[in-house]
Image (cartoon, helix red, strand yellow):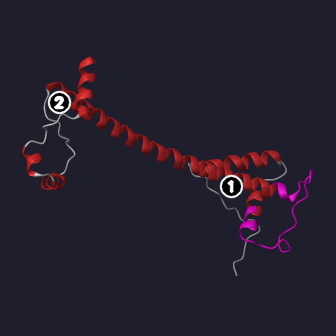
């Protein structure tokens, strides 16, 4: 078995990230509330709990001037865990919403361009064709229309286009 020297020093690294920074803040606040405890004591307690070591095997905690009940440390850890989860959730939420906002802005720009093109075409009195129509849908439309409609598809004026042209003219 591994032989330990009298004192072994291990280090804990906190990386620059939301989770580590929030954990470090919680640790600092916890140590401020319990000035007799050290970071080493806190790490040892967390390791004992994380490794599920029974309390009968654990060393007796060093007496402190103000005895704090056991549940408060569990509550503190639970709060730290919740804060870490909340920070992670906020980060994912803001990333997702930022992506959605970018997509919506692209769609709005595209729609604005299409509306401007339609307005120009209506003012010029030319035939409106949607630029996003695929060849497959054109073939489907041509084959499904009767011959009389295909020869002159714009006999009747579309009421929506006439109303839009009146609005554009008034504008």
Residue 55 position (above or below residue 158): below
Horizontal side, residue 1 vs residue 148: left or right: right
Residue ID for mark 1: 81
Residue 57 position (above or below residue 20): below
**Who comes first in sequence, dot 2 or dot 1?**
1
Spatial distance from mark 2 to mark 1, Cα to Cα? 60 Å
Q: Nearer the viewer, residue 66 or 108?
A: 108
User: Which dot, 2 or 1, sits closer to the camera?
Assistant: 2
Residue 94, position as x, y percentages in the image:
51, 44
Magenta span covers which residues? 46-72
**Residue 98 position by quadrant:** top left
The image's mark for residue 121 is: 2
Residue at the bottom extreme, as displayed? 1
Main secondary structure along the magenta-highlighted residues: loop
Q: Secondary structure at mark 1?
A: helix
Query: Which residue: 77% across, 62% down?
Result: 45
Q: Nearer the viewer, residue 114 or 125?
A: 125
Residue 36 position (above or below residue 129): below
């Amino acid at each position: 078995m591994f032989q330990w020297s009298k004192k072994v020093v291990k280090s804990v690294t906190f990386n620059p990230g939301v989770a580590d920074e929030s954990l470090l803040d919680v640790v600092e606040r916890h140590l401020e509330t319990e000035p007799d405890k050290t970071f080493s004591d806190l790490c040892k307690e967390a390791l004992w709990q994380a490794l599920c070591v029974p309390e009968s095997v654990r060393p007796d905690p060093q007496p402190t001037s103000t005895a704090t009940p056991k549940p408060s440390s569990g509550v503190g850890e639970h709060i730290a865990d919740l804060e870490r989860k909340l920070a992670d959730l906020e980060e994912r939420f803001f990333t997702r919403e930022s992506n959605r906002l970018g997509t919506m802005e692209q769609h709005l720009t595209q729609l604005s361009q299409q509306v401007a093109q339609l307005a120009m075409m209506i003012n010029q009195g030319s035939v409106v064709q949607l630029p996003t129509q695929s060849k497959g849908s054109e073939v489907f439309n041509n084959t499904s229309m009767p011959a009389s409609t295909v020869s002159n598809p714009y006999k009747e004026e579309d009421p929506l286009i006439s109303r839009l042209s009146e609005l554009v003219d008034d504008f």
